[in-house]
Amino acid sequence: MPHSGSFGLFLTLHVLSAVLLVGPLCVTTAAAPGLVRTGPAGLPRMRAAARTTRYYPPATVLIVLFGLVIVRQGSFGSVRGFGDPWLAASVVLWLAAVTITMAVVGRNLRRAVHEIERGGDARRQLPMITIGAAAAVTCWVVVIALMVVKPGS
């Protein structure tokens, strides 16, 4: 089924923004525990990861906005409406991923950076970063699976 016109444009923007935002965010989030384990040698990469976990999650609202435009344009293929359970679950999981990334992973990464800058040991931040990273990446993976499979459609 071809996707032409404005539907095709917004579908392209939706997928492109997902690839460019969620991909790096997942990689950075998943790598965060390893970065903390490197200690002072990993400080430059930890700072970059802390910035990514601060700025990329709110930027993912673009993915949602482009997706809402697609749904708003009406029924097309497996996208029927805002009431689709897989779509509602995706939005809830997106909110969870954004919240966990910013409030757990990002915050504890920033604490780890400050701890290392003061000459301390950042490894005490590891449990929360690791748990948060696992939870956030799991949310993103499930959102992607829901977007592909669209169960019940």
Image: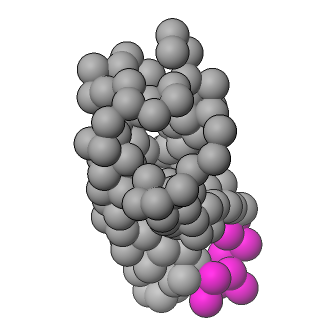
Looking at the rendered image, the quarter that the N terminus falls into is top right
Closest to the observer: 98 or 21?
Answer: 21
Q: In which quarter of the image is residue 111?
A: bottom left
As for residue 11 lying within the magenta part, the answer is no
Whole-percent x, y for residue 96 in the image: 36, 39
Please determine whether, in this image, residue 73 is positioned above or below residue 105.
above
Looking at the image, can residue 130 be seen?
no
Name the residue rendered at 44%, 86% in the picture. Answer: 118
Name the residue rendered at 55%, 35% in the picture. Answer: 147
Whole-percent x, y for residue 24 in the image: 61, 67
Q: In which quarter of the image is residue 141?
A: top right
As for residue 37 lying within the magenta part, the answer is yes
> In this image, 69 relative to 35: left or right?
left
Please determine whether, in this image, residue 5 is positioned above or below residue 115.
above
Whole-percent x, y for residue 120 in the image: 51, 76
Q: What stretch is highlighted in magenta?
A: 35-45
Looking at the image, can residue 68 be seen?
yes
Closest to the observer: 123 or 88?
Answer: 88
Please determine whether, in this image, residue 105 is positioned above or below residue 85.
below
Q: How many labels does the image show?
A: 0
Name the residue rendered at 36%, 20% in the picture. Answer: 84
Closest to the observer: 122 or 98?
Answer: 98
Whole-percent x, y for residue 145 in the image: 62, 31
The colouring scheme, among rainbow, by chain, secondary structure or one colour, is one colour
The rendered magenta stretch, by its main secondary structure, is classed as: helix
Please determine whether, in this image, residue 105 is positioned above or below residue 48.
above
Closest to the observer: 115 or 134?
Answer: 134
Q: Quadrant of residue 28?
A: bottom right
Q: Which residue lies furthest to the top in this view?
A: 152
Name the residue rendered at 54%, 83% in the picture. Answer: 48
